[in-house]
Amino acid sequence: MIQLNHIRKTYNKGKVVALEDISFTVENGEIFGLIGPDGAGKSSLFRILTTLLLADSGQASVDGFDVVKEYRQIRNSVGYMPGRFSLYQDLTVKENLNFFATVFGTTIQENYSLIKEIYQQIEPFNDRRAGKLSGGMKQKLALCCALVHRPTVLFLDEPTTGVDAVSRKEFWEMLMRLKSQGITILVSTPYMDEAILCDRIALIQKGKILSIDSPEHITQTFPGKLFAMKSAHTYKLLKDLRSFSGIDGCFAFGDSLHATFKDSGEREVLHFLHDKGHGDVSMEEIAPSIEDCFIQLLRN
């Protein structure tokens, strides 16, 4: 449904590289996640695929249509929800939906079955202006507007950024239902915990793809053992661990540190830390998360 071959995009007369040699495919009915921090190139890629931006080089197609030569067909067959709320804030919920349905030559009633479960949650606010909705309600309205013409591919650019945890959970439940109806979904997010909800993910940083695979396989291929370490003095523990000759990598994760070691480092580290004055260190082997794998790939 989506195919990219060696896409490159630069800004400021080539001085800033946004995307460098991006190639991947998204299968029909798949939820494909583009995972990376702000500035990684996710939005540039979305704008190219939705025909809003031209790549410097490379080819891309969506639903079999070339993004340059057949942009009109793509615009008629895809739904796009940009990261920033972009609906008409002075129009009501109902007016926004009717407007987008009319643009695509359809009606709310014609595709009501597709948006029913989402629309029912905002229907009580039909006469409220979009600008007066909460973050979660704005998100649901934007998704309804992107779906009202029954697209074959749905592009969601950081749809849950700035939304509360409950709304994030509800949103992903909605995406699972849309997938079951055969819609292909390309979604970007800076939240690593959302990566495991995708069928496959691409980890992207500074315009380059670091890895593409299922979340499960990416975590299974983590090199070596990973340990969670804690003490009453986290910052001192971090500094001392990074000075340890047997350390491979050490980073802060919440109230603990995640560490990997060279050779026999994991057997010697507690003695080293005891000599440094740490008498309360706990150390436990843990399964790596997507975030751990992302950091490891960055280091490599």
Image (cartoon, rainbow, N blue to C red):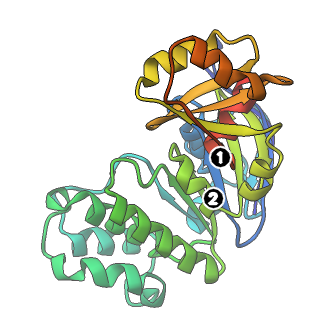
Q: Amino acid at mark 1?
A: Ile
Q: Crowdedness of circle 2 by 10 Å Cα count: few (<14), some, many (20+)?
A: some
Q: Which residue is mark 2?
A: 196
- Whether residue 173 can be seen here: yes
User: In terms of image quadrants, where is residue 116?
Assistant: bottom left
Q: Position of residue 189 (x, y in %)?
A: 53, 48
- Image quarter where the N terminus lies is bottom right
Which badge, 2 or 1, is on the more N-terminal residue? Answer: 2
Q: Residue at x 29, y 80 (%)?
A: 121
Which residue lies most toward the right here? Answer: 263
Q: Which residue is mark 1?
A: 290
Q: Nearer the viewer, residue 282 or 79?
A: 282
Q: Position of residue 210 (x, y in %)?
A: 76, 35
Quick check: marks 2 and 1 in contact, CB under 8 Å? yes
Mark 2 secondary-structure assignment: helix
Q: Amino acid at mark 2?
A: Ile
- Whether residue 249 can be seen here: no
Q: Position of residue 43 (x, y in %)?
A: 54, 40
Q: CA distance from mark 2 to mark 1?
A: 8 Å
Q: Residue at x 70, y 52 (%)?
A: 201
Mark 1 secondary-structure assignment: helix
